[in-house]
Image (tube, rainbow, N blue to C red):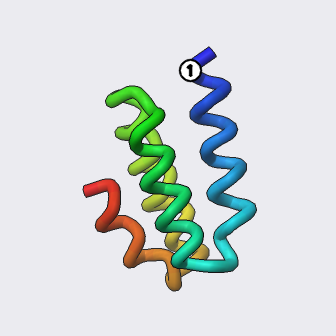
Amino acid sequence: MPRMIYDYTKSVLERVSFDPVLFAKELKKAIKNLLPYEIEQLKKWLQYFTQEHPELEQCLKVVN
């Protein structure tokens, strides 16, 4: 079940990646719902994802 939440979180973040403000908002909600090891996985995914979307790099501060 937790893996499904992590995958759902990634899909939501991909869908809202057009708007950095909305992306940061969804990211904050995700951090509240994910387990600590899932947050670590999400950090790694975000580093990869923001390479393709540099406008979202400021959102990395939310997870650090």
Q: Secondary structure at mark 1?
A: helix
Quarter occupied by residue 13: bottom right
* Relative horizontal placement of residue 18, taking residue 23 as reference (left or right): right
Extreme residue toward the bottom, this view: 55
Extreme residue toward the left, this view: 64
Horizontal and vertical percent for residue 46? Answer: 48, 57
Q: Residues within 10 Å of mark 1 (few under 14, many from 20)?
A: few
Q: Nearer the viewer, residue 29 or 4?
A: 29
Q: Say which residue appears at 63% left-offset and 47% top-offset.
A: 10
Q: Say which residue appears at 40% left-offset and 27% top-offset.
A: 35
Q: Nearer the viewer, residue 45 or 20?
A: 20
* Relative horizontal placement of residue 51, taking residue 32 as reference (left or right): right
* Relative horizontal placement of residue 46, taking residue 1 as reference (left or right): left
Quarter occupied by residue 41: top left
Horizontal and vertical percent for residue 29? Answer: 48, 49
Three-letter code for the amino acid on which mark 1 is drawn? Pro
Write down the residue under mark 1.
Answer: 2
Horizontal and vertical percent for residue 58? Answer: 38, 77
Q: Say which residue appears at 56% left-offset and 67% top-offset.
A: 23
Horizontal and vertical percent for residue 28? Answer: 43, 54
* Relative horizontal placement of residue 22, taking residue 63 as reference (left or right): right
Q: Say which residue appears at 52% left-offset and 84% top-offset.
A: 55
Quick one: quadrant of the N terminus?
top right
